[in-house]
Image: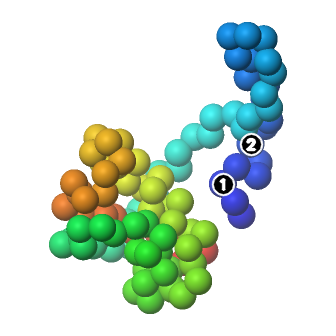
Amino acid sequence: MPRYIGQETITFTTKDGQKIPIKDFREIPIYNTSQTINDLPEKVELDEIATREEVFGNEAEFLAYFIFDHNIEKIMESKFDLSNLKEIKIPVTEES
């Protein structure tokens, strides 16, 4: 299930009064780790990792957000530059 389907739609009001519908914040789930991938290629992307056979498998790009959520703190600390990460943890999910 896409991660924002169950989230409430709220209204964000800009400083000039324009109202924009957005999804409310969602709590980041806590996952167990199924595996850790070390020695990441320099220009790796999470959807490429998700489609690896040993991760979620072929055509599983849409599951990359599980990897993002599971590594959110390190990704944010690296300013969203995955080349700064030494490892990526792969979560155990219901879809995997």
Q: Is residue 41 left or right of residue 35?
A: left
- Residue drawn at x 24%, y 73% as measured from the top left: 41
Q: Quadrant of residue 38?
A: bottom left
Labelled disc at residue 45: none
- Residue drawn at x 33%, y 73% as measured from the top left: 35
Q: Residues within 10 Å of mark 1 (few under 14, many from 20)?
A: few
Residue 76, percent across and down? 35, 42
Closest to the observer, 33 or 88:
88
Residue placed under numbered mark 1 in the picture: 3
The outermost residue toward the top is 16
Q: Residues within 10 Å of mark 2 (few under 14, many from 20)?
A: few
Quarter of the figure with the N terminus: bottom right
Residue 26, percent across and down? 62, 40
Closest to the observer, 78 or 35:
78
Residue 70, percent across and down? 42, 56
Closest to the observer, 34 or 52:
52
Residue placed under numbered mark 2 in the picture: 7
Residue 78, compared with residue 8, is above or below; it is: below
- Residue drawn at x 74%, y 42% as measured from the top left: 7
- Residue drawn at x 63%, y 35% as measured from the top left: 25
Residue 54 seen in the current view? yes
Q: Quadrant of residue 32?
A: bottom left
Residue 92, percent across and down? 47, 69
Residue 48, compared with residue 67, is above or below; it is: below
Mark 1 residue type: Arg
Q: Is residue 93 left or right of residue 5?
A: left
Residue 94 seen in the current view? no
Mark 2 residue type: Gln
Which element carries disc 1, helix, strand or loop?
loop
Contact? badges 1 and 2 (CB < 8 Å): yes
Q: Is residue 60 left or right of residue 34?
A: right
Q: Between marks 1 and 2, how big is the CA–CA gap?
A: 8 Å
